[in-house]
Each structure stands twice: as structure tokens, then as C-alpha cells.
Amino acid sequence: MAEATRILHTTLIPAFSQNPSPHLKPPFSHSQALFKKNPVRCSITTSNTDTSRSTNITQQEIPWGCDIDSPENAAALQKWLTQNGLPPQKMEIQKVEVGERGLVALKNIRKAEKLLFVPPSLFITADSEWSCPEAGEVLKRNNVPDWPLLATYLISEASFMNSSRWTNYISALPRQPYSLLYWTREELDRYLEASQIRERAIERINNVTGTYSDLRLRIFSKYPNLFPEEVFNMETFKWSFGILFSRLVRLPSMDGRVALVPWADMLNHSCEVDTFLDYDKSSQGVVFTTDRPYQPGEQVFISYGKKSNGELLLSYGFVPREGTNPRDSVELSLSIKKSDKCYKEKLEALKKHGLSIPQCFPLQITGWPLELMAYAYLAVSPPSMSKQFDKMAAAASNKSTSKKDIRYPEIEEQALQFILDSCESSISKYTKFLQASGSMDLDVTSPKQLNRKLFLKQLAVDLSTTERRILFRAQYILRRRLRDMRSGELKALTIFNGLLKYFK
Ligand SMILES: C[S@@+](CC[C@H](N)C(=O)[O-])C[C@H]1O[C@@H](n2cnc3c(N)ncnc32)[C@H](O)[C@@H]1O
């Protein structure tokens, strides 16, 4: 699946911003000049004919997807796809244990077999035809990038209901995609207080909100006939962005184009699988090649990419079982104390290399990056090492090409202790949350609310448990390294004292 954060950074911002920042700002901030004032009229009529959308339509009347446990919409989708060029398949959509709905093998599937073959006529891309062509033209004339364009397209097509070519597809989409976009600020603060994913979720929500506000200000408000507020509003944008975050695919063999690929987007993710979707030039369709055999009745999986549990929760709304994700990582936040004698110089060196105080680095169960160690060296280095600050900051930056494997034996122990302290402070936040979660008052007034809160809390508990596990591992390694170092130093000191005595 497409890497949402990267796409928001590289696709949204450059097209709209003259001053792209690596840290996400509302994406359309400097774009005024790119929008041309050129109103277009749409042929939408008030009648409810087959080829038009009623202007009286309300958001409630539009079927924004379905409850994904209802099998009818999936069956209708499957039938429609077959009638529209999807070749016979060795899988069908079924209710499954992992992912609610998924693709299940109907026949024996071999390892290294190509599956799917979804033709381009069934992809939704930035070039797809609009049921209201005038609306598409307005967005294109204003250089709206792929992501907001596709988000608007989905809403527009949903609003045309049966008149849209995509009605069967849209009706089978989840009514509420599981992603952190649907968590309120209070829920994020409460359930994800220990995890850095909270910050990422807030950033993403602000991004989506900013994108919608900008579209509304610069385009929708100027063409209310084409983009009525009852249909194109914050709620519907949350839905369409939620769909994009959890289903959009980047196709490497089509120059990295992004597309919604009906049918292929029914495949669920497994951390143990290595195969991913791509366009196959020889068969001219989206395929994937199995990396294992499947028997009839078994669910078939793909990989959504090498993502941590936190990233999977952020975009897809699920957390893999503890210990099953070899790519799992946790963001450790490192900081330099304001009381540090060289605080200003260190901050300047970090800023020069695009870093900040505090700064997050990913810890994995297998270890931590060299950049983190370089940051730790900088944090603990005394004023006498000020000449090295720039080199340390450069090595701490993952953008720098300079040598990262720097070593300063004289401050190595302090640097390791500094990382250990940061790990332990983070562990205590997770432990506090996990202990409190058992007796957390969910503050609900209906069974529906209770179900939702219980579900969110469980996701947060799962994420916190897996993230803390990585921190525990790092704590163990760091304590052992420090113990060995200190006992080595002690031994050296004993030998030295012995030698001193001998010479005396
Ligand atoms: C591309 S869709 C896959 C089809 C989806 N299951 C459906 O019924 O529409 C991605 C969504 O499937 C679900 N999903 C995928 N892999 C999963 C997994 N390993 N565990 C739990 N849910 C998963 C999540 O809700 C995710 O947002």
C-alpha cells in the first residue's frame, strides 16, 4: 500500500508550497498564486435523472460505504468486477478471522504464482473520468495534487450514487475506515499518551483538516454548484482520506503512480509475507507473486510495506500480534537539558543538520541506529569537545552523507547511560498507561460508545505492549553493556593498582 506520510510530504506539499518543510504544515499554505479565478458551471440539475446528481442531496442519503461485515456489498462488487473485465480468480471475498473481510483461496495456489490481474480500466487514478467532468476540470486547472484530488473524486463519485460507474465499489468500501483519523483529540491524548504515534496522528489529522480547509477556501467556495457543502465537508473528507490511507497503492512499475485498485484492495496484510502489489507490464494488470503456497480455504495475504506496529495503526487501524512483526520499531525521544553549558551551541549544530531538541530515533528489537548514538554523544559531550559538535550533529542526521560510525571512547559510557535513562523514562510512561488501562473509566453513555472505547483502548494497549517490549530489550542490552564496561574498567584499575604496588 502507498506510504501515506511520504506521499503527503512529496506529493501534496511540493505542488502547493513554495517553501516545503520536512515537518508537515497545512499543505496548501503558499498556494494562492497557483489557483486561477475561473468559475466553471456544472451540468448538475435538480432532477434525479440517471446521469445527474440532485442538488438537494444530503450527506445522510449518500451510502458512504457499508458495514464491512455485510456480505451483500462484497458479492455485488465481485459480480460487477467480473462483468467489467476482471478475469476469473483463484480467490473470493469472504469473512475472515484476520481483517474481517479478505481474499480466500478457492483452489491450490503455488509458491511464486502470479495472482489477481486487475486491468487498468478498473483502477481509480488521478486521470479517471469524473461523473461531473466540470468538477474534475476545476481541480486539474488548479493543479490540485493526486491525494486531495482523489479524495475529492471519491466523494464526488459517492454522491452520484447509482449514476457513478464506481457505485458497486464505493458501496463495498468500509463506512468507517479504521484509522487514527477517526480518533478524537481526547482519545489520542488518553490512549496514546505514552507513544510517539500520538504526535504523528495529530500531525496527520491537522494535515487532512488543513487540506480540506484550503480546498474549501480556494476552490469549493467559488464553485458551490460543483462542490456543495452538504456533500464536500470535513466529515466526508475524513472518510475519503481514511479510505486513501488504508487502500491506496503505489505502483513502482508505473513510475510510482498511486491508484485505488478494486479487488486487490481486499487483500489483508501479514507481517510474515514479503510480496506486494505492482503493475505487471507483460500481463498489463496489477498482480502480486505469492511467496508461499496456499490451500483452498486459506486467507491469502500481501505486505503493506516494512512498517512498524505504530505505522500500521496510524494508517490501517490495526496492531499485529505481539512479536509477529520483525519490522516493528518504537520512536525514542532524546533531549538535551536546557541547563547544559553548551545548550545553545549544540542546538545550533543540530539545527544546521535539520535536527531538533527533542529528536526521535527508531529503536528496533535488533538494536538502534548509529544516528541515535551520535546524538547521545553530542548530548553528553563536555565544553572541551565543542569542536566535535558539528561532526556529531552531522552523524546524527540521516540526511548527512558523512561517516556515522563515530566513536568517542572517553564519553561512551555517559552516552550509553544517557540512552538508558531516556529508555527508562519512556518505559515508565508505558507502564503507567498500561497499569491505569485496567481500571480506566471509559466515560460512555451507550453500548455503541462502550464498544468503540473498548476497541480503541485494546488497540492502544496492544500498541503500548509491543512498543514497551522493544524498550525493555534495549534496556537489557544497555544495562549489560554498561555493566561489562564498568567491570572492565574495575579490572583495569585493579591491575593498574597491582602494578603500582609491584613497582613501589
Ligand atoms: C486494504 S484494506 C483490506 C480489506 C479490508 N479487510 C476490507 O474488508 O475492506 C485494509 C484494511 O483491512 C484491515 N486489515 C488488513 N490487514 C489486517 C490485519 N493483519 N489485521 C487486522 N486488520 C487488517 C484493516 O482494517 C485495514 O484498514
Image (cartoon, rainbow, N blue to C red):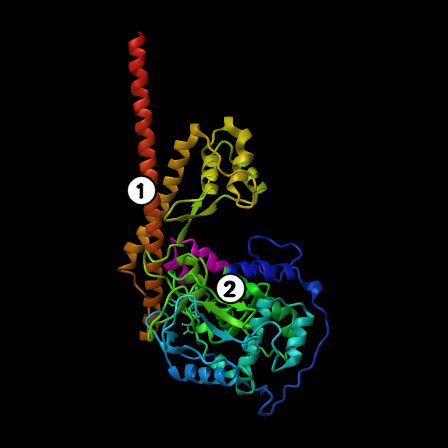
Judging by the rendered image, the residue that carries numbered circle 1 is 476
Q: Position of residue 341 (x, y in %)?
A: 49, 31
Whether residue 86 is visible to the viewer of this picture, yes or no, is: yes
Q: How many marks?
A: 2
Q: Decide which of 310, 253 is in the foreground and name it.
A: 253
Q: Distance from label 2 to label 1 (Cα)? A: 35 Å
Q: Quadrant of ligand 1?
A: bottom left
SS for callout 2? loop
Q: Position of residue 63 (x, y in %)?
A: 47, 82
Q: Tell me, for residue 2, which label it has, or none.
A: 2
Q: Tell me, for residue 225, which label it has, or none.
A: none
**Which mark is in front, 2 or 1?**
2
Q: Decide which of 153, 114 is in the foreground and name it.
A: 114
Is 81 magenta? The answer is no
- Up-down: is 320 above or below 489? below
Q: Please, what is the three-letter code of the amino acid marked with disc 1?
A: Tyr
Magenta region: which residues?
186-203
